[in-house]
Image (cartoon, rainbow, N blue to C red):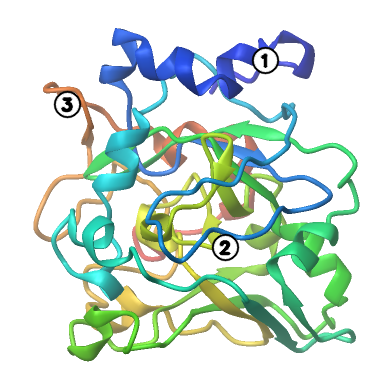
Amino acid sequence: MAIKKLSDIPYSEITKKAEYLDRRAFLAAAGIAGAGLVASNFLPEMLSPKSAFANTKLNFTKSDLSTHGEDLTPEKDVTTYNNFYEFGTDKDDPYKNATKFRTSPWTVSIEGLCDKPQKLGVDGIVKLDSNGLEERVYRMRCVEGWSMVIPWIGIPLSAVIKAAQPQSKAKYVAFQTIYDPKQMEGQQRQILDWPYVEGLRMDEAMNPLSILAVGMYGESLPNQDGAPIRLVVPWKYGFKGIKSIVKIKFVEKEPPTTWNRMAPEEYGFYSNVNPNVDHPRWSQATERRIGEFRRRKTLMFNGYGDFVASMYSGMDLKKYY
């Protein structure tokens, strides 16, 4: 994976939406987790519940962890083609059904094996970033059969972890989505075991590529994309990117995760992008990006091996899939 230095990334390459939405080249863009941005020292008023699109502009700058050589997926595709079963199982259901989802006020409970448990609004979480005077831009990509490249705006998950001061017994970080069947019609049916839960090993959570996203394409997150705050882990499959987070908990033992609990023979805890381990029902050796008709070779760790492979040294990645 090629990484640009901060000084090498043209500002227009990442932030001017009008430019990249108008370029024909972006029709070939890709996957689930694409570009990440790190949010500002202050977060404006959250997304209006009347709209399924983010209208609040966010301030941010470029990150020295940005990838390059990848065109961004058109914003229209990212906001109308989603996996968010809380709002329905069809790809366009979240766009249609999340319009009135209320994302403000919003509280995230940070709890478990830590010395400083906290209950914070999303703006408070953003302020926890110790480097908050400079927002950073990550360009990342992820895969889930189909894939996108998205300019996420967020903060390092590590900033939240450090502020909570986890205890030495805390080996994992668990996450939980809001449970509100009145607002999320998908939760009125037993499609999954609600609420949606996910987890990371502590070193994975502390990796600088793991971010809590609060926006994309220069604006706050749309409801259908996980507003007001979601996880982005670009070297893992997209279902690890839990949306609409209300709880972050430090635990000693490996926490349950929704898809592993529903189908353990198909979805492991780690869920790293690994083209050498097939899903029981399909090959994972190739992936298709939205806007492309051809399939392309899937990269180990989604191309982020230089930054994450050392965490899995000595592990049997077919056993710990």
Q: Which residue is mark 1?
A: 11
Q: Can you tell which quarter of the image residue 206 is in?
A: bottom right
Q: Identify the residue shown where x is 45% and y is 59%.
A: 241
Dot label at residue 295: 3
Q: CA distance from mark 1 to mark 3?
A: 30 Å
Can see residue 317? no
Q: Could you tell whether 268 is left or right of 124 in the image?
A: left
Dot 1 surroundings within 10 Å: few (below 14), some, or many (20 or more)?
Answer: few
Q: Identify the residue shown where x is 78% and y is 86%.
A: 169
Considering only order in the chain, which callout, 1 or 2, is on the residue closer to the N terminus? 1
Dot label at residue 229: 2
Instruction: Say what amino acid the circle numbered 3 marks.
Output: Arg
Describe the element under mark 1 as helix, strand or loop: helix
Describe the element under mark 3 as helix, strand or loop: loop
Frontmost residue, 278 versus 291: 291
Q: Identify the residue shown where x is 58% and y is 35%.
A: 218
Dot 2 surroundings within 10 Å: few (below 14), some, or many (20 or more)?
Answer: many
Vertical comparison of 158 with 245: above or below: above
Frontmost residue, 98 versus 263: 98
Vertical comparison of 71 with 251: above or below: above
Q: CA distance from mark 2 to mark 1?
A: 25 Å
Q: CA distance from mark 3 to mark 2?
A: 31 Å
Q: Can you tell which quarter of the image residue 64 is in?
A: top right
Q: Quadrant of the C terminus?
A: bottom left
